[in-house]
Image (cartoon, grey):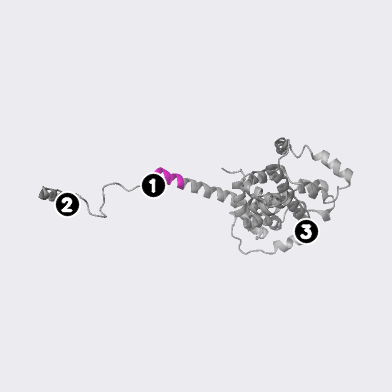
């Protein structure tokens, strides 16, 4: 029996494949359909990027060309030679530095006030217990469906009675009170913060405002950055508000100044594109430096996923 068992063991050893040899099981390969799907997705994204970036690149390229280069066909994407004189030439026809200062006078308090008041209101809707809180929040969201054109005439009459027409106040005070969209973003984020942090702070004797200031806001930096970018873009690109309430040319903002430049310098395409580049550049810089926080804020506030 012992010899028979040894012969069986030897026969099994001879049949067993050596370590590291192929067992005949095919290796798992990525399906061809998945590969083509990935390639097609990246190709579509590349085409979309080209379509979206082409106007911006054309604007910057045209701002560095002379008039004879702009009218040349086929167009040259890389200017040769580069004409930097279009940028200082803008300031000879329009006081763009004054328009920039006026715009920042409106933008800075608007962004700070909208971010602070919207976050404070959102904290009240997300954490405080009050009768009718959900109904009031519904009313706030309902204002998103109200077009601004409907309230344009009543608000103008109101500001005219207050003596605000011809000043920056109609462009600063109402946006400083926040917006329904900003309140919604912030409330969605505040709802995800564990209540145990607040309970522990209340036990230690913290007030509601101190909890909001020292606990909630430091945790809400991504969504605060998102609201800041939205508020900055809305105030910087506003054209209708300054057009209605500002009548003095020395009070023009960048958007009104660019429109006035278009009216008086229609044939100077190089300077026109240089002025447009100066108008767009701050928005690009703000989004570039806050891109990570912006995307993270959108992801965690209910707009994605």
Q: Secondary structure at mark 3?
A: helix
> Between marks 2 and 3, how big is the CA–CA gap?
88 Å
Q: Secondary structure at mark 2?
A: helix
Which residue occupies the foreground of this view, 247 or 169? 169
Q: Is residue 98 visible?
A: yes
Q: Is residue 178 left or right of residue 11?
A: right
Residue ID for mark 1: 30
The image position of residue 209, as x and y in percent, is 73, 50
Label 1 neighbour load within 10 Å: few <14, some 14-19, many 20+: few
Q: Is residue 261 magenta?
A: no
Query: Which residue is drawn at the image coordinates 78% and 58% (left, top)?
Result: 101
Residue ID for mark 2: 14
Image vertical order of residue 37 relative to residue 108, above or below = above
Residue ID for mark 3: 101
Which secondary structure is most common in the magenta stretch? helix
Of discs 3 and 1, which sits in the foreground? 1
Which residue occupies the foreground of this view, 164 or 238? 164
> Between marks 2 and 1, how big is the CA–CA gap?
35 Å
The image position of residue 211, as x and y in percent, is 69, 51
| Label 2 or label 1, whichever comes before in sequence order | 2
> Between marks 3 and 1, how big is the CA–CA gap?
57 Å
Q: Quadrant of the C terminus?
A: top right
Q: Which residues are magenta?
A: 32-38
Numbered label tally: 3
Image vertical order of residue 152 relative to residue 77, above or below = above
């Amino acid at each position: 029996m012992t010899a028979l068992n040894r012969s069986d063991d030897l026969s099994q050893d001879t049949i067993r494949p050596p370590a590291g040899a192929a067992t005949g099981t095919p290796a798992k390969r990525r399906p061809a359909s998945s590969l083509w799907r990935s390639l097609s997705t990246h190709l579509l994204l590349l085409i979309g990027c080209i379509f979206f970036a082409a106007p911006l690149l054309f604007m910057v390229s045209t701002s560095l060309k002379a008039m004879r280069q702009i009218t040349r066909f086929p167009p040259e994407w890389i200017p040769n030679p580069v004409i930097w004189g279009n940028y200082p030439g803008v300031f000879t026809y329009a006081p763009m530095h004054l328009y920039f200062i006026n715009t920042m006078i409106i933008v800075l308090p608007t962004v700070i006030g909208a971010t602070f008041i919207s976050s404070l209101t959102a904290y009240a809707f997300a954490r405080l217990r009050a009768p009718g809180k959900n109904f009031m929040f519904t009313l706030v969201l309902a204002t998103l469906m109200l077009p601004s054109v409907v309230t344009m005439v009543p608000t103008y009459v109101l500001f005219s009675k207050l003596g605000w027409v011809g000043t920056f106040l109609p462009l600063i005070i109402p946006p400083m009170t926040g917006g329904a969209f900003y309140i919604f973003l912030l409330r969605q984020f505040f709802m995800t913060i564990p209540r145990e942090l607040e309970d522990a702070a209340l036990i230690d004797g913290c007030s509601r405002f101190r909890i909001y200031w020292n606990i909630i806001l430091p945790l809400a930096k991504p969504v605060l950055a998102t609201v800041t970018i939205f508020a900055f873009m809305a105030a910087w690109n506003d054209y209708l508000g300054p057009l209605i309430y500002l009548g003095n040319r020395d009070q023009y903002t960048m958007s009104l100044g660019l429109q006035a430049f278009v009216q008086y310098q229609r044939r100077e395409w190089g300077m026109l594109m240089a002025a447009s580049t100066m108008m767009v550049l701050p928005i690009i810089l703000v989004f570039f430096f806050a891109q990570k926080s912006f995307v993270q804020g959108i992801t965690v506030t209910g707009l994605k996923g």
